[in-house]
Amino acid sequence: MDRQRPTIGIVGIVLGATALLLAVMHFWAGSLSPQPPIETTVAEKAVAIKNATIAALKGEELEQVAPKKSWDLDRIVTLATGFLAGLAFILGVVSYAMREPTRVAVGGVILGGAAMAFQFAVVAIGAIFLAILVAAVIGELGIE
């Protein structure tokens, strides 16, 4: 019996492994682009929340300014990680549908899914941490 090589699944595994390594590297290396200090970010968010709350209590309309998103190295790495993880996941499913060995197909799906899950977990933990810091600062400021 002539078995076909599991090419699609192996490509999925390589892309999934690359995405997972990229996600872990980005987490451990920290920000690759210059970022303002955490104190500045928390202070700006706390003041913005305080001003919005005071304006809402007074019945005033607050003008909404959309933040400008720029392409920096952090955003590119995050996008590349998500793209590679999604592609690995899809290739794993296609590999399974093409009846390539199950281990190879599942490997691509698991590595792609793990990279996606890792990115979501890091973002969620960061958002929770920032919310706790902002709440603590707002608690110290008090609304008068």
Image (tube, helix red, strand yellow):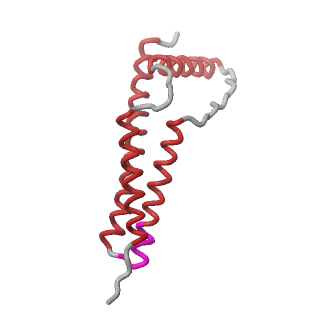
Instruction: Please say whether residue 54 is one of the residues in the magenta stretch.
Output: no
Provide the major secondary structure of the magenta segment: helix
Residue 21 in the image, given as x and y percentages of width and height: 36, 47
Q: Residue at x 43, y 61 (%)?
A: 89
Of residue 119 and residue 45, the one placed in the foreground of this image is 119
Q: Decide: is 16 above or below 52.
A: below
Q: How many marks?
A: 0
Q: Is residue 143 left or right of residue 18?
A: right
Q: Is residue 52 left or right of residue 31?
A: right
Instruction: Please say whether residue 96 is one of the residues in the magenta stretch.
Output: yes
| View extreme (left): residue | 103
Q: Residue at x 46, y 32 (%)?
A: 32
Of residue 34 and residue 64, the one placed in the foreground of this image is 34
Q: Quadrant of residue 100?
A: bottom left
The span shown in magenta is: 92-100
| View extreme (top): residue | 144
Q: Decide: is 110 above or below 3.
A: above
Q: Quadrant of residue 31?
A: top left
Q: Is residue 127 left or right of residue 60?
A: left
Residue 70 in the image, given as x and y percentages of width and height: 61, 34
| View extreme (bottom): residue | 1
Residue 61 in the image, given as x and y percentages of width and height: 69, 24
Q: Decide: is 48 above or below 116.
A: above
Quarter of the rendering occupied by the N terminus = bottom left
Of residue 15 and residue 38, the one placed in the foreground of this image is 15
Q: Residue at x 40, y 19 (%)?
A: 136
